Structures are given as structure tokens and as C-alpha cells.
Image (spheres, grey):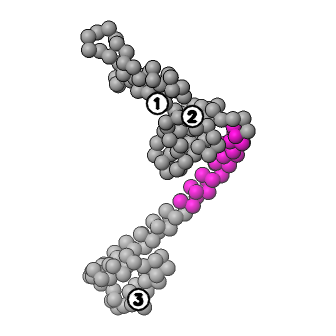
Amino acid sequence: MRCDVMLLVITRDPTVARWAHQSIDLGHPGFELRPVVVDLPEVPRILDADLAHVSPEFAVLSSLAHPDRVVAETALGAIRTMPEDARKLYSQAILAQLPEPARGDLETLMDLWDKYKPLFEQHYYERGLKEGREEGGTAASREALRTFLATRFGGVTDEQQARIAAADSAQLSRWIARAAHASSAEAVLTE
């Protein structure tokens, strides 16, 4: 894979953590391996969703170190957007560490999420599409008005440009309709 290699030891047992901190002599002079040791009780509880989303793997590690529902929910939320294979692996690891009542509750929650996720995604996709069309339509109206005024009246001043940029779509529609009969760019933009 052409990448650096390290030995990572993750343990709950302080005795194993002390033992794993020792260097391993590889037999060649000067070649010693020093494992990276993660003593799970020292891993912080990740409860902040923003932090969990920045480092979902750290959130998963936190849920392994602190097998309770709140930490697990935070970690499960952080891995939702990961590729499916990683999400499945991490969610199984998270759920395997939990006591049975919490595991059952979270499995039910995950099933509901999987069932309704497409509906939420469709809603937000359609909302984003509508907002994008509205913004695009407003931008196109601004550009059409500027072009029409520049062509018909020989230009648009900086102050007029600023008024056009600040106008909403309803105002732009009124100005475009007025531009066909106005005697100047200022007459179009004056209320």
C-alpha cells in the first residue's frame, strides 16, 4: 500500500497497556518498534456532534471506551454519511459494546432512520432545488434588467447597479415590466 506502518494496541486493561508501551527489539541494531498504545479508559467521552462529525473514527473509539447510549448515539450520528462498508463495520462495533437494553433501542432507532432517510433526503433535495431555482431566477432577472437598461439607455451607473443587486425578485419583475415604456434607466428604477 506504500504507506507507513505502525502497531496500534487498544486495550481496556492497564496491565496490557503498561506491557504494550515497551519497545520491541527487531533484531537489527537500532531497530526497535514502539507501539502506539490507546488505553481505552483514557479516551474522552465524545458527546459533541460537531466534534464527532469532524473525526467520526475518534467518536467510534470513544463509544468503544465508554459503552453507553449517549456516546453511542453521537458516534452513530457521526458515521451516517460515511461509505456503507465503513458505516456497517463501525455500527456493528459500536452496538457490540453496548449493554442489551441500549443496543435494542439503538437498533430500532437505526432501522427507523434507514426507513425514513430517503424521505428526509428527498424533502431536502426538493427544498434545495426550489431555493436554487429561485436564486438562479433572481440572478437571471438582475442580469436581464442590466442588459436591457444598458442596451436601451446606454449604460447603468454604479448606484443603479447597487439598487438592482439589492432588489428582490418581485421588485425586479416590476422594473423589467416598466423598462419597456420608460424614458430612462432612472425612470425604471424609481418608485
The picture places residue 54, in percent across and down from the top left corner, at 46, 46
Crowd class of label 2 (few under 14; some 14 to 19; many from 20; radius 10 Å): many
Label 2: which secondary element: helix
Q: CA distance from mark 1 to mark 2?
A: 12 Å
The residue nearer to you, when weighing 168 against 156, is 168
Query: What residue did someone put label 3 on?
Result: 181
- Find residue 13 and report its image quarter: top right
| Rendered residue at 53%/38% (across/down) | 62
Mark 1: amino acid: Val
Query: What residue did someone put label 1 on?
Result: 38
Up-down relation of residue 190 to residue 44 (above or below): below
- In primary-sequence order, the first of circles 1 and 2 is 1
Mark in the foreground, 3 or 2: 2
| Rendered residue at 34%/24% (across/down) | 4
- Asked whether the viewer can see residue 149, the reply is no
Q: Horizontally, is 107 left or right of 184 in the view? A: right
- Asked whether the viewer can see residue 130, the reply is yes
Query: What residue did someone put label 2 on?
Result: 64
The picture places residue 38, in percent across and down from the top left corner, at 46, 30
Residue 13 marker: none
Part of the protein shown in magenta: 102-129
Label 3: which secondary element: loop
Q: CA distance from mark 3 to mark 2?
A: 72 Å
